[in-house]
Amino acid sequence: MDSVHLALDFGSASGRLVAGKFNGERLKLQEIHRFPNQPVRFNGRLYWDFLRLFHEMMTGLKKASRLGLKVESIGTDTWGVDYAFLDKQGFLLGDLIHYRDDRGNGMLEEIKKDTSVSLADIYEVTGIHYMTLNSLFQLYYDVKYRPHIVEKADALLFLPDLFTYGLTGEKYNEYTIASTSQMLDARKKIWAAGLLEKLGLPVHLLQKLIEPGTICGMLAKPIQAEVGLPAIPVIAVGSHDTASAVAATPLQSKNSAYLSSGSWSLFGVELTEPLINQKSSKHNFTNEGGVEGTIRYLKNITGLWIIQQLKKKWSAADPTIDYSWISREAQKAQTECAIAPDHEDFLAPYDMEKAILDYCRDEFGQNLRGRAEIARSVYNGIAT
């Protein structure tokens, strides 16, 4: 009989529950449940709708139960950097703020003003390239401007850790997701406590680090009763989605590279040790933790996020518009305009279409005409 393992894969645009059926030689995948991930704006801030995502996860597990699948394990992965605070009773302290929220803007300048720590100091320890959305800068904001939340907290859990906690009641920080935070010592693979203390960040909220493959706990009894599954082991997979993607990529040699493309495009190689030097820092390469002790040395650039936002707007007005339509129309367009996908204008605008039109007009003096040229300017930029 096939062994069945459930993968809960949460992306920034959608999530899914997939059953992997393994007969000892071949793995077959069956999608059980798929759902949209729709962030929420409130009072100028951008949030993840975590409770909706947890509800969808439970819906997927119920579907797996109704199918009669003999499930042997469950694992969860998500995007990187985002986290939540729990108090001593396990209550969530506030809603989960989206990494595309602008609270990280200006935090590096405030760190330079408030402390003796430089960006070079941070990179030397963590090996993670600078982005305002990194957990380190989000947490610096929280300590400085939301102390009422931080002071009540008993634990900081990254998003896959939080889903696992909801399933098991156990608190851990899985290594690959923790490595995206810019708070881990890349060489020692432990929390960069010395650096964090210099920044005034609450090291005591960070949890025990566990490696991919660790059994976090069993499916809690209340969850068993609700979804109709027995006491199944919940496994800490490579819970940063890119870590799992790279682990599944059949790299043929030490000279092989990978490209993981979704909302973000991550191009890199697997190393046995982090590569941290001035040249690496200058070119904004990052050292994230991988499965089986590897380092994912990569370049992180904006991927299909912008196209996703255009599709969301256009398909609301015309349901026949899908990604295939956008791609076909973009191929026909003649414009050579190429946006800079990593420009801050495209991080989280209220209207992505308008942001692109304004950018091309202001930067290049070009007035794009129609959806095809708008999409083409994005693809041109990604390819540049």
Image (cartoon, rainbow, N blue to C red):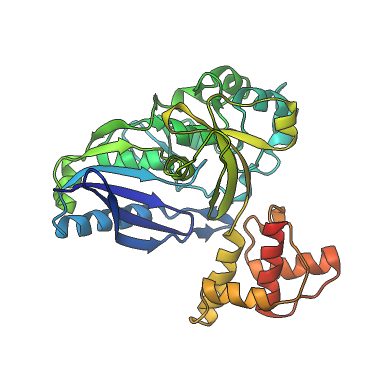
Is 372 above or below relative to 230? below
Residue 129 seen in render: no
Residue at 21% across / 56% down in the picture?
Answer: 64
Q: Could you tell me how many numbered marks the image carries? A: 0
Locate residue 254, reporting x and y percent. Answer: 54, 33
Give x and y (percent) for residue 383: 69, 58
Instruction: Tell whether 181 sits left or right of 113.
Output: left
Q: Nearer the viewer, residue 384 or 90?
A: 384
Q: Looking at this view, name the residue that lies furthest to the front.
A: 252
Relative to 170, 37 lies left or right: right
Residue occupying image coordinates x 29% and y 32%: 216
Q: Is residue 340 left or right of residue 126?
A: right
Residue 269 image point, x, y percent: 57, 37
Q: Examine the image and state in which quarter residue 239 appears.
A: top left
Relative vertical location of residue 46 with respect to residue 167 in this rendering, above or below: below
Q: Between residues 155 and 76, which one lies in front from this camera angle?
A: 76
Look at the image and tell me in which quarter the C terminus lies: bottom right
Write down the quadrant of residue 245 in the picture: top left
When asked about the image quadrant of residue 194, the answer is top right
**Residue at 22% from the left image edge and 43% from the top image edge:** 24
Toward the viewer: 384 or 150?
A: 384
Q: Return the residue nearer the eye: 358 or 304.
A: 304
Res. 224 visible in picture: yes
Q: Is residue 278 left or right of residue 47?
A: right
Residue at point 50% right, 22% down? 189
